[in-house]
Image: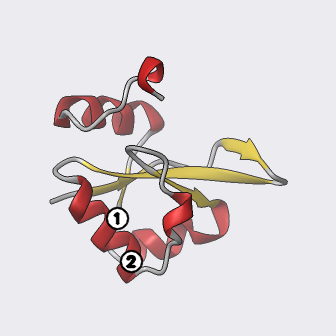
Amino acid sequence: MTILIDPPLWPAHGTLWSHLVSDTAIDELHAFAALNTLPRRSFDRDHYDVPATRHDELVAAGAVSVTANELTRRLIASGLRVKARDR
């Protein structure tokens, strides 16, 4: 299992946000999120939205920091990506 996180680039609600994904299984993503006290409400179908203040902490906990393009590419390759039309 690899948990991936992109840089906090996405503005909303007065902060920047990262995306946290698994390249293997949604259950493993939920387990990593629970272990690191991410609220379930931050899950959005195939990723967790993570505020910039948590990025370094999640990398220290084992998430692999990758570019936003790499994260998207690997999420699609995993078969876990929920397409925009299905959101």
The residue furthest top is: 85
Q: Which mark is residue 34?
A: 2
In front here: 6 or 42? 42
Seen from the viewer's position, the closer of residues 26 and 59 is 26
Q: Amino acid at mark 2?
A: Ala
Residue 67 relative to residue 77: left or right = right
Q: Secondary structure at mark 2?
A: helix
Q: Nearer the viewer, residue 57 or 29?
A: 29
Residue at horizontal 42 percent and vertical 30 percent from the top: 69
Please tell me in which quadrant of the rendered image residue 15 appears.
bottom right
Horizontal and vertical percent for residue 32? 32, 72
Q: Is residue 55 left or right of residue 33?
A: right
Instruction: Say the numbered circle drawn on residue 63.
Output: 1
Instruction: Give me the residue at 21% from left, 57% from top.
Output: 2
Residue 77 location, quadrant: top left
Q: Residue at x 39, y 23 (%)?
A: 83
Q: Judge the density around disc 2: few (<14), some (14-19), many (≥20) Cα neighbours within 10 Å.
A: few
